[in-house]
Amino acid sequence: MLASYTRKSNIAAAVFIACIVGDVVLISSGHRELWDNDVFAAVLGLTFVTSYLYAVWAYVKAKGRSGAWVLLGVFLSVIGLTALLLLKDLHKERTEGAASETVP
């Protein structure tokens, strides 16, 4: 996997998880009225969606696939994410193939 995309995916996933944890903490501590605030709800919702999509996109790119594979993770939810996790790493195959061709 490409290290730069893997790092980006990990950062976006950490932001997504932090938003979920923050939301659970706010709701469990009795701050449900924050969701009535249009600005807070819009910003948190946009952060959820953007960080999730970017994390999946970067993960797919790290594996050497087209960014369109994100649609699999979006529309098929858990099944799609499982399929993405099971995809072969094309970048690794290209690197190994190139290394074996240069060595006589």
Image (cartoon, grey):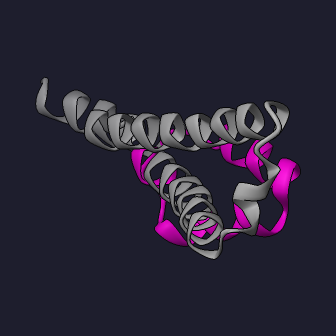
Residue at 60% x, 43% y is: 19
Residue farthest along the top direction in this orientation: 103
Residue at 50% x, 34% y is: 14
Residue 86 seen in this snapshot: no
| Quarter of the image where the C terminus is located | top left
- Write down the quadrant of residue 10 in the picture: top left
Front residue of 23 and 6: 23
Residue 101 spot, x, y in % from top left = 20, 35
Is 30 located above or below residue 76 in the figure? Answer: above
Residue at 49% x, 46% y is: 59
Is 70 located above or below residue 59 in the figure? Answer: below
Residue at 40% x, 37% y is: 11
Residue 63 spot, x, y in % from top left = 46, 44
Residue 45 spot, x, y in % from top left = 64, 64
Front residue of 20 and 89: 20
Magenta residues?
60-89
Q: Is residue 98 magenta?
A: no
**26 relative to 4 in the view: left or right:** right
Front residue of 51 and 65: 51
- Write down the quadrant of residue 62 in the picture: top left
